Image: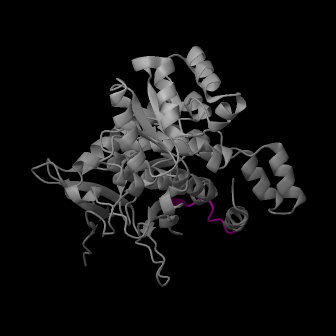
Amino acid sequence: MTDHYELTMLQAALQSGAAHRTCVFEVFTRSLPAGRRYGVLAGTGRFLEGLQNFKFSERELNFLAERKVVNEETIEYLRNFKFTGNIYGYAEGEIFFPHSPVLQIEGTFAEAVILETYLLSILNYDSAVASAASRMSIAAGTRPCLEMGSRRAHEEAAVAAARAAVIAGFTSTSNLEAGLRYGLHTIGTSAHAFTLLHDTEEDAFRAQLDSLGLDTTLLVDTYDVEKAVRLAVELAGDQLGAVRLDSGDLVAQAMWVRELLDSLGNQKTKITVTSDLDEYAIASLAAAPVDSYGVGTKLVTGSGAPTSSMVYKIVARENSEGVMEPVAKASKNKSSVGGRKNAVRRINDSGVATAELIGVDVTAPADSNDRELLVDFVINGELQPGFTGAEGVRAASTRHAQSIRELPRNASRLSAGEPVIPSEFIVKEQTN
Protein backbone atom coordinates (compact mmCIF):
# COMPACT_ATOMS: atom_id res chain seq x y z
CA MET A 1 0.00 0.00 0.00
CA THR A 2 3.03 2.25 -0.48
CA ASP A 3 4.23 4.12 -3.55
CA HIS A 4 7.73 3.26 -4.75
CA TYR A 5 9.14 6.73 -4.13
CA GLU A 6 8.19 6.73 -0.46
CA LEU A 7 10.79 4.01 0.06
CA THR A 8 13.47 5.55 -2.12
CA MET A 9 13.07 8.79 -0.14
CA LEU A 10 13.41 6.73 3.03
CA GLN A 11 16.61 5.10 1.75
CA ALA A 12 18.19 8.44 0.81
CA ALA A 13 17.16 9.98 4.15
CA LEU A 14 18.70 7.06 6.03
CA GLN A 15 21.85 7.60 3.99
CA SER A 16 21.98 11.35 4.78
CA GLY A 17 21.12 10.87 8.43
CA ALA A 18 17.97 13.01 8.21
CA ALA A 19 15.52 10.10 8.38
CA HIS A 20 15.22 10.32 12.15
CA ARG A 21 14.54 14.03 12.32
CA THR A 22 11.18 14.86 13.93
CA CYS A 23 8.68 16.15 11.35
CA VAL A 24 5.08 17.26 11.17
CA PHE A 25 3.06 16.27 8.09
CA GLU A 26 -0.40 17.67 7.41
CA VAL A 27 -3.36 16.48 5.35
CA PHE A 28 -5.50 19.19 3.74
CA THR A 29 -7.20 20.11 0.49
CA ARG A 30 -6.50 23.32 -1.38
CA SER A 31 -10.04 23.57 -2.72
CA LEU A 32 -13.42 21.87 -2.63
CA PRO A 33 -14.95 20.28 -5.76
CA ALA A 34 -16.37 22.99 -8.02
CA GLY A 35 -19.40 24.59 -6.45
CA ARG A 36 -19.38 22.52 -3.25
CA ARG A 37 -19.94 24.47 -0.03
CA TYR A 38 -18.30 22.07 2.42
CA GLY A 39 -16.63 18.67 2.67
CA VAL A 40 -17.09 15.81 5.14
CA LEU A 41 -14.08 14.03 6.61
CA ALA A 42 -14.32 10.23 6.55
CA GLY A 43 -11.88 7.35 6.60
CA THR A 44 -9.91 8.33 9.71
CA GLY A 45 -11.12 5.28 11.62
CA ARG A 46 -10.23 2.96 8.73
CA PHE A 47 -6.76 4.47 8.55
CA LEU A 48 -6.24 4.01 12.29
CA GLU A 49 -7.40 0.40 12.04
CA GLY A 50 -4.93 -0.25 9.24
CA LEU A 51 -2.12 1.54 11.06
CA GLN A 52 -2.21 -1.10 13.79
CA ASN A 53 -1.23 -3.70 11.18
CA PHE A 54 0.97 -1.54 8.97
CA LYS A 55 4.01 -3.82 8.85
CA PHE A 56 6.24 -5.34 6.20
CA SER A 57 6.15 -9.12 5.86
CA GLU A 58 9.12 -11.21 4.81
CA ARG A 59 7.41 -11.85 1.46
CA GLU A 60 7.15 -8.11 0.88
CA LEU A 61 10.71 -7.47 2.00
CA ASN A 62 11.95 -10.20 -0.33
CA PHE A 63 10.10 -8.52 -3.20
CA LEU A 64 11.81 -5.20 -2.42
CA ALA A 65 15.22 -6.92 -2.29
CA GLU A 66 14.73 -8.94 -5.48
CA ARG A 67 13.55 -5.87 -7.43
CA LYS A 68 16.32 -3.77 -5.89
CA VAL A 69 13.77 -1.13 -4.90
CA VAL A 70 15.81 -0.28 -1.80
CA ASN A 71 19.07 -1.38 -0.22
CA GLU A 72 19.65 -3.77 2.68
CA GLU A 73 19.85 -1.01 5.30
CA THR A 74 16.38 0.21 4.32
CA ILE A 75 14.99 -3.31 4.30
CA GLU A 76 16.28 -3.83 7.84
CA TYR A 77 14.57 -0.60 8.91
CA LEU A 78 11.29 -1.75 7.34
CA ARG A 79 11.57 -5.19 8.93
CA ASN A 80 11.13 -3.57 12.35
CA PHE A 81 8.76 -0.78 11.30
CA LYS A 82 6.20 0.39 13.84
CA PHE A 83 4.73 3.87 14.06
CA THR A 84 5.68 5.42 17.41
CA GLY A 85 4.67 9.05 16.86
CA ASN A 86 1.56 11.15 17.38
CA ILE A 87 -1.51 11.68 15.21
CA TYR A 88 -3.98 14.54 15.66
CA GLY A 89 -6.85 15.72 13.51
CA TYR A 90 -10.47 16.60 13.02
CA ALA A 91 -12.91 14.07 14.43
CA GLU A 92 -14.24 11.78 11.73
CA GLY A 93 -17.55 13.08 10.39
CA GLU A 94 -16.44 16.69 10.88
CA ILE A 95 -17.02 19.33 8.20
CA PHE A 96 -13.91 20.66 6.47
CA PHE A 97 -13.01 23.52 4.14
CA PRO A 98 -10.00 24.48 2.00
CA HIS A 99 -6.78 24.31 4.05
CA SER A 100 -8.47 22.70 7.07
CA PRO A 101 -5.69 20.65 8.79
CA VAL A 102 -7.82 17.50 8.91
CA LEU A 103 -4.97 15.21 9.99
CA GLN A 104 -1.47 15.76 11.35
CA ILE A 105 1.26 13.12 11.63
CA GLU A 106 4.10 13.89 14.02
CA GLY A 107 7.06 11.52 14.07
CA THR A 108 10.37 10.90 12.42
CA PHE A 109 10.56 11.53 8.69
CA ALA A 110 11.11 7.80 8.22
CA GLU A 111 7.90 6.91 10.07
CA ALA A 112 5.74 9.63 8.56
CA VAL A 113 6.71 9.44 4.90
CA ILE A 114 5.85 5.74 4.59
CA LEU A 115 2.23 6.41 5.57
CA GLU A 116 1.48 8.94 2.81
CA THR A 117 0.04 6.72 0.09
CA TYR A 118 -2.03 4.55 2.40
CA LEU A 119 -3.41 7.53 4.29
CA LEU A 120 -4.34 9.59 1.24
CA SER A 121 -5.94 6.68 -0.61
CA ILE A 122 -8.31 6.18 2.33
CA LEU A 123 -9.13 9.79 3.18
CA ASN A 124 -9.54 10.93 -0.42
CA TYR A 125 -12.06 8.23 -1.31
CA ASP A 126 -13.98 7.98 1.94
CA SER A 127 -14.31 11.75 2.27
CA ALA A 128 -15.53 12.03 -1.34
CA VAL A 129 -18.29 9.50 -0.64
CA ALA A 130 -19.19 11.08 2.71
CA SER A 131 -19.35 14.55 1.15
CA ALA A 132 -21.75 13.29 -1.53
CA ALA A 133 -23.77 11.33 1.01
CA SER A 134 -24.16 14.40 3.20
CA ARG A 135 -25.62 16.42 0.32
CA MET A 136 -27.98 13.56 -0.49
CA SER A 137 -29.08 13.18 3.12
CA ILE A 138 -29.80 16.89 3.40
CA ALA A 139 -31.75 16.82 0.13
CA ALA A 140 -33.78 13.88 1.46
CA GLY A 141 -34.82 15.71 4.61
CA THR A 142 -36.42 13.31 7.07
CA ARG A 143 -36.69 10.52 4.52
CA PRO A 144 -34.01 7.82 4.91
CA CYS A 145 -31.31 7.21 2.30
CA LEU A 146 -30.16 3.62 1.77
CA GLU A 147 -26.69 2.77 0.41
CA MET A 148 -26.84 0.31 -2.51
CA GLY A 149 -23.66 0.90 -4.49
CA SER A 150 -21.54 -2.18 -3.87
CA ARG A 151 -21.74 -3.47 -7.45
CA ARG A 152 -20.42 -0.19 -8.80
CA ALA A 153 -17.15 -0.16 -6.86
CA HIS A 154 -14.08 -2.24 -6.04
CA GLU A 155 -15.03 -4.83 -3.43
CA GLU A 156 -13.07 -3.11 -0.64
CA ALA A 157 -14.16 0.35 -1.80
CA ALA A 158 -17.74 -0.89 -1.52
CA VAL A 159 -17.26 -1.56 2.20
CA ALA A 160 -15.56 1.81 2.66
CA ALA A 161 -18.36 3.58 0.79
CA ALA A 162 -21.05 1.97 2.93
CA ARG A 163 -19.23 3.04 6.08
CA ALA A 164 -18.70 6.61 4.82
CA ALA A 165 -22.33 6.93 3.73
CA VAL A 166 -23.64 5.94 7.16
CA ILE A 167 -21.28 8.45 8.80
CA ALA A 168 -22.78 11.16 6.59
CA GLY A 169 -26.44 10.44 7.27
CA PHE A 170 -27.47 7.26 5.43
CA THR A 171 -29.42 4.86 7.63
CA SER A 172 -28.41 1.50 6.18
CA THR A 173 -26.51 -0.40 3.50
CA SER A 174 -26.97 -3.43 1.28
CA ASN A 175 -23.33 -4.45 1.91
CA LEU A 176 -23.13 -7.35 4.35
CA GLU A 177 -19.38 -7.08 4.91
CA ALA A 178 -19.83 -3.48 6.03
CA GLY A 179 -22.55 -4.67 8.37
CA LEU A 180 -20.22 -7.31 9.79
CA ARG A 181 -17.18 -5.06 10.26
CA TYR A 182 -18.89 -1.93 11.51
CA GLY A 183 -22.23 -2.98 12.93
CA LEU A 184 -24.20 -1.20 10.20
CA HIS A 185 -27.86 -1.93 9.60
CA THR A 186 -28.25 -3.94 6.37
CA ILE A 187 -31.24 -4.04 4.03
CA GLY A 188 -32.41 -5.80 0.85
CA THR A 189 -35.18 -8.02 -0.50
CA SER A 190 -35.15 -8.95 -4.18
CA ALA A 191 -34.10 -7.94 -7.69
CA HIS A 192 -35.76 -8.31 -11.07
CA ALA A 193 -33.98 -11.63 -11.52
CA PHE A 194 -36.08 -13.12 -8.72
CA THR A 195 -39.29 -12.19 -10.51
CA LEU A 196 -37.98 -13.43 -13.85
CA LEU A 197 -36.94 -16.73 -12.27
CA HIS A 198 -40.58 -17.68 -11.62
CA ASP A 199 -43.18 -18.63 -14.18
CA THR A 200 -45.38 -15.71 -13.18
CA GLU A 201 -45.07 -12.51 -11.18
CA GLU A 202 -47.67 -13.91 -8.80
CA ASP A 203 -45.47 -16.95 -8.12
CA ALA A 204 -42.53 -14.66 -7.35
CA PHE A 205 -44.53 -12.39 -5.03
CA ARG A 206 -46.05 -15.37 -3.20
CA ALA A 207 -42.61 -16.93 -2.67
CA GLN A 208 -41.19 -13.67 -1.27
CA LEU A 209 -44.17 -13.00 0.98
CA ASP A 210 -44.22 -16.57 2.28
CA SER A 211 -40.50 -16.49 3.03
CA LEU A 212 -39.89 -12.92 4.21
CA GLY A 213 -43.27 -11.91 5.59
CA LEU A 214 -45.95 -9.46 4.62
CA ASP A 215 -43.89 -6.43 5.63
CA THR A 216 -41.32 -7.10 2.88
CA THR A 217 -40.69 -4.74 -0.06
CA LEU A 218 -41.94 -5.99 -3.44
CA LEU A 219 -40.27 -4.79 -6.66
CA VAL A 220 -43.17 -3.82 -8.91
CA ASP A 221 -41.69 -2.60 -12.21
CA THR A 222 -40.46 -5.83 -13.84
CA TYR A 223 -43.49 -5.88 -16.15
CA ASP A 224 -46.52 -3.63 -15.66
CA VAL A 225 -46.40 -1.44 -12.53
CA GLU A 226 -50.15 -1.04 -12.05
CA LYS A 227 -50.83 -4.76 -12.41
CA ALA A 228 -47.97 -5.54 -10.04
CA VAL A 229 -49.20 -3.12 -7.35
CA ARG A 230 -52.72 -4.52 -7.55
CA LEU A 231 -51.35 -8.07 -7.35
CA ALA A 232 -49.15 -7.17 -4.37
CA VAL A 233 -52.10 -5.77 -2.46
CA GLU A 234 -54.27 -8.74 -3.41
CA LEU A 235 -51.68 -11.14 -1.98
CA ALA A 236 -50.49 -9.19 1.08
CA GLY A 237 -53.46 -7.00 1.92
CA ASP A 238 -53.00 -3.83 3.90
CA GLN A 239 -50.03 -5.35 5.75
CA LEU A 240 -47.75 -5.02 2.72
CA GLY A 241 -44.59 -3.25 3.86
CA ALA A 242 -43.48 -1.40 0.75
CA VAL A 243 -43.18 -1.39 -3.00
CA ARG A 244 -40.01 -0.41 -4.88
CA LEU A 245 -39.87 1.60 -8.10
CA ASP A 246 -36.66 1.32 -10.12
CA SER A 247 -37.39 2.91 -13.50
CA GLY A 248 -39.35 5.51 -15.41
CA ASP A 249 -40.47 8.98 -14.33
CA LEU A 250 -40.16 8.44 -10.60
CA VAL A 251 -41.99 11.62 -9.61
CA ALA A 252 -45.08 10.95 -11.71
CA GLN A 253 -44.98 7.21 -11.04
CA ALA A 254 -44.69 7.63 -7.27
CA MET A 255 -47.71 9.95 -7.25
CA TRP A 256 -50.06 7.63 -9.05
CA VAL A 257 -48.77 4.54 -7.23
CA ARG A 258 -49.48 6.33 -3.95
CA GLU A 259 -52.97 7.13 -5.14
CA LEU A 260 -53.47 3.53 -6.23
CA LEU A 261 -52.24 2.10 -2.93
CA ASP A 262 -54.45 4.45 -0.96
CA SER A 263 -57.48 3.61 -3.08
CA LEU A 264 -56.87 -0.07 -2.36
CA GLY A 265 -56.75 0.52 1.39
CA ASN A 266 -52.93 0.40 1.72
CA GLN A 267 -52.29 3.81 3.20
CA LYS A 268 -49.48 2.41 5.35
CA THR A 269 -47.62 0.67 2.51
CA LYS A 270 -44.47 2.67 1.76
CA ILE A 271 -42.81 3.54 -1.52
CA THR A 272 -39.05 3.34 -1.98
CA VAL A 273 -37.36 4.52 -5.15
CA THR A 274 -34.02 3.58 -6.73
CA SER A 275 -32.58 4.09 -10.26
CA ASP A 276 -29.34 6.08 -10.47
CA LEU A 277 -30.28 8.74 -7.93
CA ASP A 278 -28.08 11.66 -6.89
CA GLU A 279 -28.72 14.69 -4.66
CA TYR A 280 -30.44 16.58 -7.48
CA ALA A 281 -32.79 13.69 -8.31
CA ILE A 282 -33.54 13.29 -4.61
CA ALA A 283 -34.32 17.00 -4.32
CA SER A 284 -36.65 16.76 -7.32
CA LEU A 285 -38.58 14.03 -5.52
CA ALA A 286 -39.18 16.18 -2.42
CA ALA A 287 -42.82 16.81 -3.35
CA ALA A 288 -43.43 13.20 -4.42
CA PRO A 289 -44.99 10.73 -1.96
CA VAL A 290 -41.74 8.78 -1.52
CA ASP A 291 -40.70 7.21 1.79
CA SER A 292 -37.03 6.31 1.16
CA TYR A 293 -34.28 6.49 -1.45
CA GLY A 294 -31.88 3.74 -2.54
CA VAL A 295 -28.67 5.26 -3.88
CA GLY A 296 -25.86 3.45 -5.66
CA THR A 297 -23.60 4.56 -8.52
CA LYS A 298 -23.62 8.32 -7.89
CA LEU A 299 -22.88 7.79 -4.20
CA VAL A 300 -19.88 5.48 -4.50
CA THR A 301 -18.36 7.72 -7.19
CA GLY A 302 -18.68 10.88 -5.10
CA SER A 303 -21.54 12.22 -7.24
CA GLY A 304 -19.15 13.69 -9.79
CA ALA A 305 -16.26 14.30 -7.38
CA PRO A 306 -14.60 10.88 -6.86
CA THR A 307 -11.68 12.32 -4.88
CA SER A 308 -11.35 15.02 -2.25
CA SER A 309 -8.00 16.22 -3.68
CA MET A 310 -6.35 15.92 -0.29
CA VAL A 311 -2.58 16.22 -0.11
CA TYR A 312 0.04 15.28 2.49
CA LYS A 313 2.70 17.90 3.03
CA ILE A 314 5.54 18.36 5.48
CA VAL A 315 4.94 21.64 7.35
CA ALA A 316 7.59 21.52 10.09
CA ARG A 317 10.82 19.65 10.67
CA GLU A 318 13.76 19.44 12.99
CA ASN A 319 16.80 21.18 11.54
CA SER A 320 20.42 20.09 11.83
CA GLU A 321 20.69 21.84 15.18
CA GLY A 322 17.71 19.94 16.60
CA VAL A 323 15.32 22.92 16.48
CA MET A 324 11.83 22.59 15.00
CA GLU A 325 11.10 25.08 12.23
CA PRO A 326 8.30 25.58 9.68
CA VAL A 327 8.80 24.55 6.06
CA ALA A 328 6.55 25.12 3.03
CA LYS A 329 6.31 24.60 -0.72
CA ALA A 330 6.43 27.72 -2.87
CA SER A 331 5.45 25.98 -6.14
CA LYS A 332 3.07 27.97 -8.33
CA ASN A 333 -0.58 27.01 -7.61
CA LYS A 334 0.65 24.31 -5.22
CA SER A 335 2.04 26.31 -2.35
CA SER A 336 1.55 25.23 1.25
CA VAL A 337 1.52 27.07 4.57
CA GLY A 338 4.36 26.02 6.84
CA GLY A 339 4.04 25.54 10.58
CA ARG A 340 2.13 23.35 12.98
CA LYS A 341 -1.61 24.09 12.83
CA ASN A 342 -4.52 24.08 15.22
CA ALA A 343 -8.08 24.99 14.33
CA VAL A 344 -11.22 26.43 15.89
CA ARG A 345 -14.76 26.63 14.54
CA ARG A 346 -16.04 30.13 15.35
CA ILE A 347 -19.66 29.89 16.59
CA ASN A 348 -21.92 32.91 17.16
CA ASP A 349 -24.43 33.40 19.97
CA SER A 350 -27.12 31.67 17.89
CA GLY A 351 -25.03 28.52 17.62
CA VAL A 352 -24.19 29.09 13.94
CA ALA A 353 -20.69 28.66 12.52
CA THR A 354 -19.25 31.87 11.08
CA ALA A 355 -15.60 31.02 10.34
CA GLU A 356 -12.82 28.49 10.63
CA LEU A 357 -9.78 29.90 12.39
CA ILE A 358 -6.48 28.12 11.68
CA GLY A 359 -3.61 28.98 13.99
CA VAL A 360 -0.11 28.64 12.52
CA ASP A 361 2.41 27.97 15.28
CA VAL A 362 0.02 29.81 17.58
CA THR A 363 -3.24 28.91 19.29
CA ALA A 364 -6.22 30.21 17.34
CA PRO A 365 -8.28 32.54 19.55
CA ALA A 366 -11.51 31.10 20.87
CA ASP A 367 -14.30 32.18 23.19
CA SER A 368 -16.85 30.13 25.10
CA ASN A 369 -19.05 29.59 22.02
CA ASP A 370 -16.25 28.33 19.81
CA ARG A 371 -15.23 24.72 19.29
CA GLU A 372 -11.70 23.36 19.04
CA LEU A 373 -11.43 20.93 16.14
CA LEU A 374 -8.31 18.82 16.68
CA VAL A 375 -8.45 15.68 18.80
CA ASP A 376 -5.77 13.15 19.78
CA PHE A 377 -5.87 9.86 17.85
CA VAL A 378 -2.46 8.34 18.55
CA ILE A 379 -0.05 9.34 21.33
CA ASN A 380 3.48 7.92 21.33
CA GLY A 381 2.35 5.17 19.00
CA GLU A 382 -0.64 4.17 21.14
CA LEU A 383 -4.10 4.34 19.57
CA GLN A 384 -6.57 6.20 21.75
CA PRO A 385 -9.96 4.52 22.34
CA GLY A 386 -13.23 5.27 20.58
CA PHE A 387 -12.18 5.95 16.98
CA THR A 388 -12.29 2.53 15.29
CA GLY A 389 -14.78 -0.26 14.58
CA ALA A 390 -18.50 0.14 15.14
CA GLU A 391 -17.90 2.55 18.02
CA GLY A 392 -15.93 4.84 15.73
CA VAL A 393 -18.68 4.86 13.10
CA ARG A 394 -21.32 5.77 15.68
CA ALA A 395 -19.19 8.61 17.03
CA ALA A 396 -18.45 9.88 13.52
CA SER A 397 -22.13 9.82 12.57
CA THR A 398 -22.99 11.84 15.67
CA ARG A 399 -20.18 14.30 14.95
CA HIS A 400 -21.40 14.79 11.39
CA ALA A 401 -24.99 15.46 12.45
CA GLN A 402 -23.88 17.98 15.07
CA SER A 403 -21.51 19.75 12.67
CA ILE A 404 -24.20 20.04 9.99
CA ARG A 405 -26.57 21.64 12.49
CA GLU A 406 -23.95 24.33 13.18
CA LEU A 407 -23.63 25.42 9.55
CA PRO A 408 -25.47 28.43 8.11
CA ARG A 409 -28.70 27.66 6.31
CA ASN A 410 -27.24 28.13 2.84
CA ALA A 411 -25.01 25.07 3.40
CA SER A 412 -27.98 22.96 2.26
CA ARG A 413 -28.21 24.61 -1.16
CA LEU A 414 -27.30 22.38 -4.08
CA SER A 415 -26.55 25.30 -6.39
CA ALA A 416 -22.88 26.11 -6.90
CA GLY A 417 -21.37 28.46 -4.37
CA GLU A 418 -18.35 29.36 -2.30
CA PRO A 419 -17.45 27.51 0.93
CA VAL A 420 -20.24 28.23 3.40
CA ILE A 421 -17.84 29.77 5.92
CA PRO A 422 -14.40 31.31 5.35
CA SER A 423 -11.10 29.90 6.56
CA GLU A 424 -8.79 32.42 8.22
CA PHE A 425 -5.13 31.88 9.08
CA ILE A 426 -3.88 33.28 12.39
CA VAL A 427 -0.11 33.65 12.14
CA LYS A 428 2.30 34.01 15.02
CA GLU A 429 3.63 37.54 15.30
CA GLN A 430 7.34 37.88 14.63
CA THR A 431 9.50 39.49 17.29
CA ASN A 432 12.80 41.28 16.72
Q: Residue furthest right?
A: 66
Residue 371 in view here: yes
Query: Does 96 lie within the magenta span?
Result: no
Front one among 181 and 341: 181
Point out residue 370 in the picture as x, y percentages from the top left corner: 19, 50
Which residue sits at x=27%, y=75%? 430
104 vs 347, left or right, is right
* Residue 385 visible in this rendered orientation of the protein: no
Please say if 173 is above or below 30.
Answer: above
Q: Is residue 114 left or right of residue 395?
A: right
Q: Report how many numbered discs are placed on residues in the image.
A: 0
Q: Position of residue 374 (x, y in %)?
A: 35, 49
Q: Main secondary structure of the magenta part?
A: loop
Q: Which residues are magenta?
A: 16-23
Name the one closer to the observer, 258 or 304.
258
At x 62%, y 53%, the residue is: 118
**Magenta span includes 19:** yes
Left or right of residue 351: residue 262 = right
Residue 429 x %, y %: 24, 72
Quadrant for the C terminus in the image? bottom left
Query: At 70% across and 44% down in the image, what residue appears?
Result: 55
